[in-house]
Image (spheres, coloured by chain):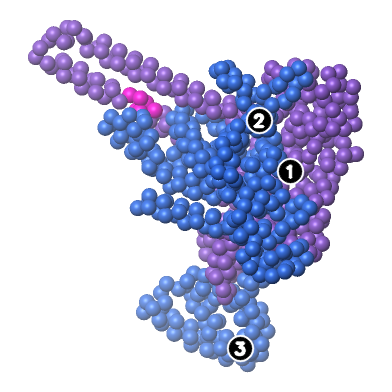
Chain colours: A blue, B purple
Amino acid sequence: MADKNAQDVSAEVETTETQQPASKQKTNAFVAFWKNLGGKVKGVFGGWSNKSPRHVEADLVLNQQQQLSTGEKVKRALKAQSGWLFVAPALLLMLLFTFYPIVSAFINAFKQDLDLTGNYSGWGFDNFVHVFKGDTGTGGATFVQCLINTLVFTLVSVPLSTLIALLISVALNSIKAVQKAYQTILFLPYLTNSLAMGAVFATFFTLVNSGSGTNVGLINQFLGLFGIPPTDWMGIGAPVWELGDAVKIYWTKYLVVIIYEIWSGLPFKILILFSALQSVNKQYYDAARVDGAKRSTILWKITTPMIMPQISYLLVTGIMGGMKQYTAVVGLFGSKMGLQFEVGTMVGYVYQYIEGGSPKYGYAYAASLLLFAIIMVITFINNKITGKRSH
Amino acid sequence: MANKQIDDKQQNVTNPAPEQQPASAAETNFAPIGAALEEAPTQFDVERAIKRQKTLRIVKDVFVYIFLTICAVLAFLPFYWMVITSLKNEWEYRAITPTFFPTQGVVWKNYEIVLSSTDNSQNNFGQILVNTLVVGLLSTVIGVIITVITAYAFARMNFKGKNALFALMLATMMIPGEMYTISNYQMTRGWEWNNTYIVLILPFLVSVYYTYLLRNNFMQIPDSLYQAAKVDGLSDFGYLVKVMVPLTAPTLVSITLLKFIGTWNSYIWPRLINNDESWQMITNWVTGGFTDMNGVLYNGDVFQWISNTESLTTLRMAAVCMVSLPLFVLFIFCRKYIMRGVSKSGTKG
């Protein structure tokens, strides 16, 4: 409503600027006077009482359009659509780099032997069949392996880091001295380059030849204090569980990824949860204390439910982001995502097909559609769960 | 203010007993049997209880502080390790007993080698930095302008199909970027746009989420301002520049910073499309080899276990520091804007 009025006013401004034949202007003024009078009368009787005189005038100007020439009408009509002019740059770019590519991805996934120039040999489900049947691409891992890797990384690291963030936020919220200092330090990992910090984390776990023996890395050194023998976390000697023929679980490598994910995900989660905690009404705590509730009871029965919207927001966005993770693993394990892509993620699996000597674009499209489908399924499950919880 | 409230709450949470204590004390006072009174004088009881509460609170506080300190140390450790490793020599880094300070002298030469090795195209820092700054500045400036005018049109202007278009744009956020990255790759390679700046800038100019964010911000500005501006003869564009932009400046600063950080951290697209390393960005540079190929540092290595073709961790850490430093500086100076932007947008960089 308000917007409509605004538009009317703009039309009025426009009229005063445009040149019009004198006679027409006279008639208009005459009509305007009567209409104006009518409007005022109506205003008195309450019909248009919510409109200021200026709005009434603007409406009159709108009515005048009926007496305008065709050219003027077109001009007005164009003016009313001038919003398209404002969105044009974004729209053109999106047509070219978003809308068209999405459509073409759906089409290209069904083209066989698609090459860079767009030539293909036929239509069919070949690409999907190959991806499902365990094509290892140039990397060396199957789609199922990458799917399991991604799911494990995400479903372990996201809930864990949310829980840790919750504990830290509650602790932060309960202290008063040097709270700001702790907050700042805990937020430091906030703005980091995941390739760069991944390289730093890799040094914690990597075994290096020191010439006179093996430098087992910081983590092994630390675990050694408790008598735990050193492990080759990320290298050739990493322990592995083989599940069936195709799936290998390098659990120490998984741990490295999960530890890094937790470290890099914490600051954002702390930021969200801490600000949520600060806005919780203090009366709930007081009431609980009067009833003699313990600290842990207060945490799990009052604080957590109060900030449940934020927690579920973090879980949902964390899982969504986790399914698309890529750079963290590359930062830790290099662009080959391990020695033979054994910690490859789904996104990594998609990209491996368009890199290297013999790219297979059809497979890449098919795999990206599968990734999309999986993300949609997870979104659906997420919505179900969070929807149920809020009722 | 908030701190003070927490303080009050703190005292309440740890002192539930004193409320009971006086009650029980009163009970003892008026109890017909005086034995308990003689055995434990009321005054003493209360004091002891308060004392016990105080100790309990201190113990709990100590635990909280220890927990937070451990977390803070763990959060900070990778940064510390990155800096000291970049200043060690490779022998010291590889020594069996790790040192937490460069004991064999600070090796600034690591940085010199990382920044200056022009004979190794992979490590050509100057070119890479120019690429990153050109692409970062152009895509940030143009991207923010496009975001502003698009958000304005969706927030303030009326045109046919506005809502449908907006819904369509938002719907694309559901689709993983990988799907259109492959199409974009094929398309721009077909146009022979690979190894150019334009291919690094154009596909990422429009950010639907920032448009959405800014549109919501614009819509909070009262209509009366718009009408007043119209009456004063301001055009839509004039109103946008003179009224809307100044009023939403904090959000715009956040978007600008986040967009630039996004470019700084971009990795996969430059790697895919610009396979010539001299057209890549700074994050790609970090994953380079970093060897002592000219033998400046370890030529004639007395222990014979560092070769000229080996990737050296100390050099890589120097590169990692170079990439992380600007982010750090930004974080320190623009923390407020960045945190606000990120907490609103829910994306990291």
* Protein chain holding label 2: A
* Residue placed under numbered mark 1 in the picture: B283
Mark 1: give few (<14), some (14-19) or many (20+) Cα within 10 Å: many
Earlier in the chain: of badge 3 and badge 2, it is 3
Local SS, label 1: helix
Q: CA distance from mark 3 to mark 2?
A: 84 Å
Q: Residue at x 56, y 36 (%)?
A: A241
* Residue placed under numbered mark 2 in the picture: A237
Image coords of residue A18 (percent x, y) = 66, 81
Q: CA distance from mark 2 to mark 1?
A: 29 Å
Q: Residue at x 52, y 70 (%)?
A: A3
Q: Residue B241 or A120: which is nearer the viewer?
A: A120
Magenta residues: mostly which secondary structure?
Answer: helix
Q: Which residues are magenta?
A: B10-15
Q: Are marks 3 and 2 in contact (CB under 8 Å)?
A: no
Q: Residue at x 66, y 78 (%)?
A: A17
Q: Amino acid at mark 2?
A: Gly
Label of residue A257 in the image: none
Does B11 lie within the magenta span? yes
Image coords of residue A117 (percent x, y) = 78, 65
Check if mark 3 and mark 2 are on a common chain.
yes
Q: Residue B296 or B222: which is nearer the viewer?
A: B296
* Residue placed under numbered mark 3 in the picture: A68
